[in-house]
Image (spheres, rainbow, N blue to C red):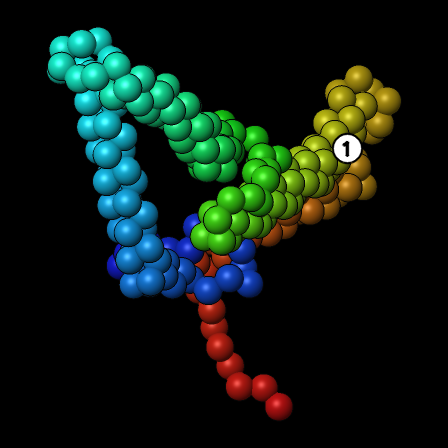
Amino acid sequence: MWAGGRGRRPSWWPAEEPWPPPHPPRPSGRVLLRFGLTFSLSLLTLAAIVAAGVWAALVALGVISASWELRGAALAILLGGIGCFIALARAMRRRMAPIAALIEGAAQIERGDYSARVPERGGREVRALARTFNTMSERLGTIDSQRRSFLADVAHELRTPLSIMRGRLEAMIDGIHPRDDDHLRAILEHASSLERLVADVATVALAETGSLPLHLEPLD
């Protein structure tokens, strides 16, 4: 329904937003090039560190014959490589922290917790994604709050005439009120009010699903 734009407008979709929604923008060539270069340089750096570490380990352990000076240099390179690996792991962890926060926030929304917010940090694209995520979460929370409020109002409006009708009928059965036309007419009025409320709810449901028939007429 997203890609083809088919289907009716869902009830949770904001009325002020266009339906069907526009296609999500594709990443620009600059972003893809930057990602490719970063990935390639990371692979080359990792390969160089691994090769230097293997060579230094073999020289330090005496597998490859070398002088004491070369063995000392190899041991220093090995220790430096371990330090660089630890620093690289910490840097990757810091860079992946915003992505992990987005994943956790998406899991919270999936569980129905629309109060999920993520910190807007990291690269420019990641910050833009976090900002969009927070906006989406806030909008979903607003829609859910409006839905709950609407259901509470509907329940209250439906309960009131039912309670009055039940009270009048019980009073007539117990003999408190006479079974005359005046009391029956009052019950009929509340039944009509209840019928109008049910019809209004059905109209709202049809409007939200896009199935409400519209009769357009020119007006002066």
Residue at image x 39%, y 28%? 84
Q: Which of 8 and 195 is in front in this view?
A: 8
Q: Vertically, is 61 above or below 206?
A: above
For mark 1, what is the residue? 164
Quadrant for residue 220, please give it: bottom right
Is residue 41 something one can see in this rendering? Answer: yes
Q: Nearer the viewer, residue 193 or 98?
A: 98
The kind of secondary structure element at disc 1 is: helix
Residue at image x 46%, y 37%? 95
Q: Which of 90 and 113 is in front in this view?
A: 90
Residue 67 appears at what percent x and percent y?
A: 21, 17
**From this viewpoint, which residue is outermost toward the right?**
176
**From this viewpoint, which residue is outermost toward the bottom?**
220
In the rendered structure, the answer to whether residue 84 lies left or right of residue 29 reads right
Task: Report the number of discs.
Answer: 1
Is residue 5 something one can see in this rendering? Answer: no
Residue 1 appears at what percent x and percent y?
A: 30, 53
Residue at image x 44%, y 28%? 87
Check disc 1: other Cα within 10 Å, few if <14, some if 14-19, many if 20+.
some
Residue at image x 59%, y 40%? 119
Q: Which amino acid does label 1 sit on?
A: Ile
Q: Which of 84 and 155 is in front in this view?
A: 84
In the rendered structure, the answer to whether residue 83 lies left or right of residue 171 reads left
Residue 180 appears at what percent x and percent y?
A: 79, 35
In the rendered structure, the answer to whether residue 154 lies left or right of residue 86 reads right
Quadrant for residue 6, please give it: bottom left
In the rendered structure, the answer to whether residue 28 lies left or right of residue 175 reads left
Residue 170 appears at what percent x and percent y?
A: 76, 22
